[in-house]
Image (tube, rainbow, N blue to C red):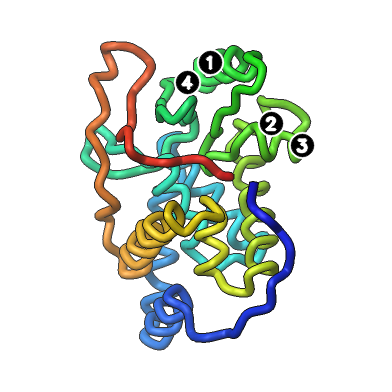
Amino acid sequence: MISRAHHPVSWPVSCLAAIFMSLAGTGLFAANALAQAGKALGSLENICLSEARRAEAQHGIPSGLLQSITRVEAGRKTVTGEFMPWAWTLNDAGKGLFFDSREAAMRHLEAAVAVPGHSVDVGCMQVNTKWHMEGFHNLSDMLDPVQNADYAAGFLLDLHESHRSWDDAVKHYHSSEPAKNVAYHGRVLAELERFLAGDDAAVPATEPADPAAGNLLPVEDDTELALI
């Protein structure tokens, strides 16, 4: 479990800050953020992006940051070739799973957490049941895209307050261990750059299985989705 203790550090210009500042001066930041946000609205496939965008604005998080995190955490390639996060994503025992409905995801989630000592990473922002269940009334609320995004936003803000940089907050959102969080930070950073530049391309993903084969669509095995 990560520590939320405050550790004062210096304030150099971070990787994320450099991206925000470089694009803000050109006007691309606002224009492309709005364009990308428009693409995020209006469909279940993009509900994670729309709720991440809302949570960014509501909680004062830099535009695009939560949206980039949800793409990395719960992203999959759609039938049109786009890379979008999926709300009914679980990571169970290190295996990422996409479900075709909220009900199917809930059935798996309830059965999994009924096993003593078992934990699952849940939803758009892959919130872990072991470490973060106390932030929700029940599992259904944890899977809900609105509450999932709001909790993740609050957690990221806590990390930013503790570590005093968005870069370190992103790293510790995933893990407190550098061996795990450095590569993760790089993926989020790359996704954020694409978002702010208006590029729809996204971090690489394994093609999902044929939906006709069942309601479980595996994501790449080496993707660590845990919010720990």
Q: Nearer the viewer, residue 163 or 36?
A: 163
Instruction: Give the amino acid type for the residue marked by disc 3 in the picture.
Output: Glu
Marks 4/3: CA distance? Answer: 25 Å
Q: Nearer the viewer, residue 225 or 9?
A: 9
Instruction: Give the amino acid type for the residue marked by disc 2 in the picture.
Output: Asp
Q: Is residue 104 visible?
A: yes
| Residue under pointer 4 | 101
Instruction: Give the amino acid type for the residue marked by disc 4 in the picture.
Output: Ser
* Mark toward the start of the polypeptide (2 vs 3): 3
Q: Position of residue 44 (x, y in %)?
A: 45, 34
Dividing the picture into quadrants, the one containing residue 114 is top right
Q: Residue at x 25, y 47 (%)?
A: 204
Instruction: Give the amino acid type for the residue marked by disc 1 in the picture.
Output: His
Left or right: residue 122 versus residue 59 is: left
Residue 164 is labelled as none
Dividing the picture into quadrants, the one containing residue 28 is bottom left
Marks 1/2: CA distance? Answer: 15 Å
Marks 2/4: CA distance? Answer: 15 Å
| Residue under pointer 3 | 134
Q: Nearer the viewer, residue 223 or 16?
A: 223
Q: Is residue 37 visible?
A: no
Residue 141 is labelled as 2
The mark closer to the camera, 4 or 3, is 3
| Residue under pointer 1 | 108
* Mark toward the start of the polypeptide (1 vs 4): 4
